[in-house]
């Protein structure tokens, strides 16, 4: 596109309405109303180029209406995501799809299918944030670059039509001591922190130009904040995982890529006792009963770091880092990771022992111990007596088709399908054994599995957190607030003074608070022979 030459000699970008230097209207007839000075009449790309696909994409995202609709969609999605709990807040031992369907019916199933259960990690929510960021970047560039060039290139001597079409304007004929009165006005403007420039007897007084950048500083802050939010999708930048560990177990810490391991040495819980506490708590403890109020719970842990490279299938070579007592609000911290104690579970089933006995005589042929976390398939009792574990359901229930199934791999309600082999029945007798239920395929079974005892363990629940995006979020929030203050408490004020034949033309402009600048300038003009500024929109 060809650049546009103004009669003042300044070369303007194509699409400019008002000359950046003198303010003369470049295209079309002189307007009857005041000029639109929002962007100084500068050439905006979205208003100039509309042919190519890139132009159309740019124009779409530069629209303020599009940005507002994206924000509305994000707000609606965020509000819908609060109708039912997010997946991180539901019990860890349930299948999410079944939980939402069983607890909330059809709406819960739709909620899960659309991804609202993990709203802030869903791909479409990420795209909404990316679209908002793109809208902010394009809308800002579309406005701030031409505005910057216009303010930078503005001349002191403005065209007569520019002065006369400003909202606040006056015209004064030649008076006595004109130069002295002009000097008095300029002196008072400088005392009010105006920056005054002079050219051929004409003046431009300006202050608080920096306030024009307030909205764009806001945009920069929001963009940095959105970048911080989207960085959470990058592996290693953000970790918020749950870790359950049983007493005596060592488990890899999630989100550390196998680098760190945590061993639960022992879980401990302390409760209030009525005869040991202050009288202030005596009544409450008496109502709830001894031992029902938890005073403290903690897990004594050992942190290990893996040495060498990770080789799948090999036992990790661990180096002890530190011991720590993890309590509520007293996490284990190492490098950028923090491990918080958030919950516990007492006496979870760990192992169950059964005896293979004769149904009639109760004669025992040996015992087997089933590790509920890692059960074996075959148990040899000797003398041709064997037990095969055909099926194992850690958290047993009957599904909608009447078949046994498990809700999770946590052994809260274990059930087994055993095949009991004896010399008399080498093919074995099959039996379904649950905690309170035994179902045999045939009444002719000679053997049965008799429950003997169970071993339990305590579990500790930890939340593993790492957040390298906080700096982005904090920086973005701080910059946003700077932009709010910058644009809210200051306003850009300008006063043009032009000698015109036998008179003086004055015009003032501000981006907001017209009453403020009119009152300020008129107070300066009171002690002179210059006419007061009048608001031409009220005439």
Image (cartoon, rainbow, N blue to C red):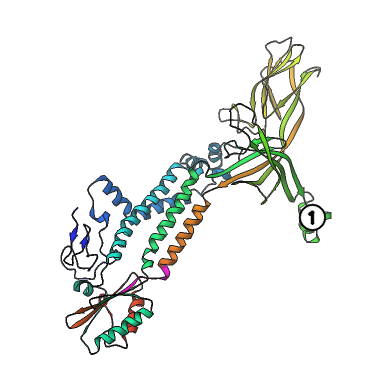
Residue at far right of view = 275
Q: Quadrant of the C terminus?
A: bottom left
Name which residue lies at 39% across and 64% down: 214
Q: How many marks?
A: 1
Res 187 seen here = yes
How far from the left and from the top, in percent, is residue 124?
A: 42, 43
Location of residue 179 with respect to 393 vertically, above or below: below
Position of residue 429 relative to residue 370, above or below, is above
Q: Up-down: is 363 above or below 10?
A: above
Q: Residues within 10 Å of mark 1 (few under 14, many from 20)?
A: few
* 390 drawn magenta: no
Q: Residue at x 63, y 34 (%)?
A: 307
Q: Which residue is nearer to you in this view: 100 or 89?
A: 89
Q: Position of residue 166 (x, y in %)?
A: 25, 73
Residue reaching furthest to the bottom? 176
The quadrant where residue 44 appears: bottom left
Which residues are the magenta region? 488-496
Residue to which mark 1 is pinned:
286
The quadrant where residue 495 appears: bottom left
| 489 part of magenta stretch | yes
Q: Position of residue 383 (x, y in %)?
A: 77, 11
Q: Residue at x 33, y 69 (%)?
A: 511
Foreground pick, 366 / 288: 366
Expressed as whole percent of the image width and height from the top left, the position of residue 135 reads 36, 52
């Amino acid at each position: 596109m060809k650049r546009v030459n103004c009669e003042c000699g300044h070369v303007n970008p194509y699409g400019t309405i008002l000359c950046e230097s003198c303010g003369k209207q470049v295209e079309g007839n002189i307007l009857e109303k005041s000029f639109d000075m929002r962007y100084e009449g500068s050439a905006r790309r979205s208003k100039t180029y509309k042919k190519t696909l890139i132009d159309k994409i740019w124009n779409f995202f530069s629209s303020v209406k599009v940005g507002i609709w994206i924000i509305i969609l994000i707000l609606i999605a965020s509000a819908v995501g609060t109708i039912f709990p997010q997946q991180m807040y539901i019990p860890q031992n349930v299948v999410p799809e079944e939980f939402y369907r069983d607890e909330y019916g059809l709406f819960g199933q739709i909620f899960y299918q659309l991804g609202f259960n993990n709203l802030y990690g869903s791909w479409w929510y990420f795209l909404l944030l990316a679209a908002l960021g793109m809208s902010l970047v394009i809308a800002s560039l579309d406005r701030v670059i031409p505005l910057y060039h216009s303010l930078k290139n503005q001349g002191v001597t403005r065209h007569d039509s520019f002065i006369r079409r400003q909202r606040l304007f006056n015209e004064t004929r030649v008076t006595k001591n004109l130069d002295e009165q002009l000097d008095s006005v300029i002196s008072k403007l400088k005392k009010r922190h105006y920056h005054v420039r002079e050219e051929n007897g004409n003046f431009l007084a300006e202050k608080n130009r920096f306030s024009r950048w307030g909205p764009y500083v806001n945009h920069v802050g929001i963009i940095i904040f959105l970048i911080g939010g989207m960085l959470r999708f990058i592996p290693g930048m953000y970790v918020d995982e749950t870790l359950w560990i049983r007493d005596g177990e060592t488990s890899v810490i999630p989100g550390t890529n196998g680098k760190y391991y945590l061993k639960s040495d022992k879980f401990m819980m302390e409760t209030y006792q009525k005869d040991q506490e202050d009288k202030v708590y005596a009544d409450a403890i008496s109502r709830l009963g001894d031992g029902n109020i938890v005073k403290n719970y903690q897990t004594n842990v050992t942190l290990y770091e893996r040495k060498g490279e990770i080789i799948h299938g090999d036992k990790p070579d661990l180096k002890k880092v530190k011991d720590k007592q993890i309590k509520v609000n007293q996490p284990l911290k190492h490098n950028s990771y923090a491990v918080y104690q958030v919950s516990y579970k007492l006496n979870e089933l760990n192992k169950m022992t059964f005896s293979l006995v004769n149904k009639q005589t109760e004669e025992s042929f040996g015992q087997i111990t089933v590790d509920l976390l890692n059960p074996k398939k075959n148990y040899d009792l000797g003398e041709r007596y064997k037990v095969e574990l055909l099926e194992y359901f850690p958290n047993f229930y009957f599904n909608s088709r009447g078949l046994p199934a498990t809700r999770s791999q946590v052994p809260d309600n274990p059930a087994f399908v055993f095949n009991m082999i004896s010399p008399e029945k080498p093919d074995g007798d099959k039996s379904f054994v649950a905690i309170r239920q035994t179902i045999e395929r045939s009444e002719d079974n000679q053997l049965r599995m008799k429950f003997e005892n169970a071993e339990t363990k305590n579990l500790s629940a930890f939340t593993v957190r790492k957040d390298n995006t906080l700096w982005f979020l904090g920086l973005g929030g701080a910059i946003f607030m700077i932009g709010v203050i910058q644009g809210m408490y200051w306003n850009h004020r300008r006063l043009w003074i032009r000698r015109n034949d036998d008179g003086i033309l004055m015009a003032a402009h501000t981006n907001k608070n017209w009453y403020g600048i009119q009152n300020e300038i008129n107070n300066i003009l009171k002690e002179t022979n210059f006419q007061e500024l009048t608001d031409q929109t009220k005439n």
